[in-house]
Amino acid sequence: MMTTDRKLPEKWAKSAKAAKAVQVAFDMDEKVQYSIRKSALDEGISPSDQIRHILDLPVTRKPKRPRLTVSLSAEDYEQLGQRYGLAAEQQLEIKRRVMEELAAFSNK
């Protein structure tokens, strides 16, 4: 078997570094968590970036898509379909309606 000493492309090397990082979870008092999350929101950054700021660790400034996520099960789509008068299989239309409802909520 032959081995080569080729270097990884720079893009892959960065990904390899990131793959070696270990996510650390902290169980903290709700007031501490709220404070960190709120300050992150006020700064327009993620809670993990806020923790890195607090700890004086470097923060990568990659542009992030502003988005919210939620996991929806088949039963959730069924319930939302009923709510909007759609079939559960009409997931794109259900998503559009959910986005409209969330936008309306934010305008209250």
Image (cartoon, rainbow, N blue to C red):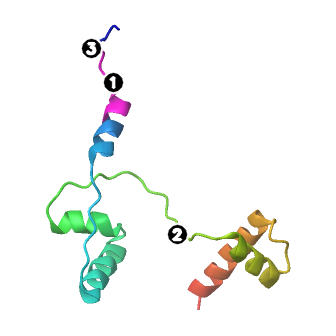
Q: CA distance from mark 2 to mark 1?
A: 34 Å
Q: Position of residue 13 (x, y in %)?
A: 31, 32
Residue at x 32%, y 73% (from the top left corner): 40
Foreground disc of the pair 1, 3 = 3
Q: Of 6 and 64, which appears nearest the observer? A: 6
Q: Residues within 10 Å of mark 2 (few under 14, many from 20)?
A: few
Q: Report the residue marked by disc 3.
A: 5
Q: Secondary structure at mark 3?
A: loop
Q: Position of residue 11 (x, y in %)?
A: 37, 32
Instruction: State yes or no: discs 1 and 3 in contact (Cβ < 8 Å).
Output: no
Q: Is residue 9 covered in magenta? A: yes
Q: Is residue 42 covered in magenta? A: no
Q: Secondary structure at mark 2?
A: loop
Give above or below for 22 relative to 85.
above
Magenta segment boundaries in residue numbering:
6-13
Q: Position of residue 89 (x, y in %)?
A: 81, 65
Q: Is residue 59 left or right of residue 96?
A: left
Q: Of 55 and 64, which appears nearest the observer? A: 55
Q: Report the residue marked by disc 1.
A: 8
Give above or below for 106 relative to 22.
below
Tell me which numbered mark, 2 or 1, is placed earlier along the sequence.
Answer: 1
Residue extending farthest bottom: 108
Q: Residues within 10 Å of mark 1 (few under 14, many from 20)?
A: few
Q: Position of residue 66 (x, y in %)?
A: 49, 64
Residue 41's image quarter?
bottom left
Q: Is residue 31 left or right of residue 72?
A: left
Question: Residue type at mark 2?
Answer: Leu
Question: Residue type at mark 1?
Answer: Leu
Residue at x 20%, y 54% (from the top left corner): 58
Give above or below for 14 relative to 23.
above
Q: Report the residue marked by disc 2.
A: 68
Foreground disc of the pair 2, 3 = 3
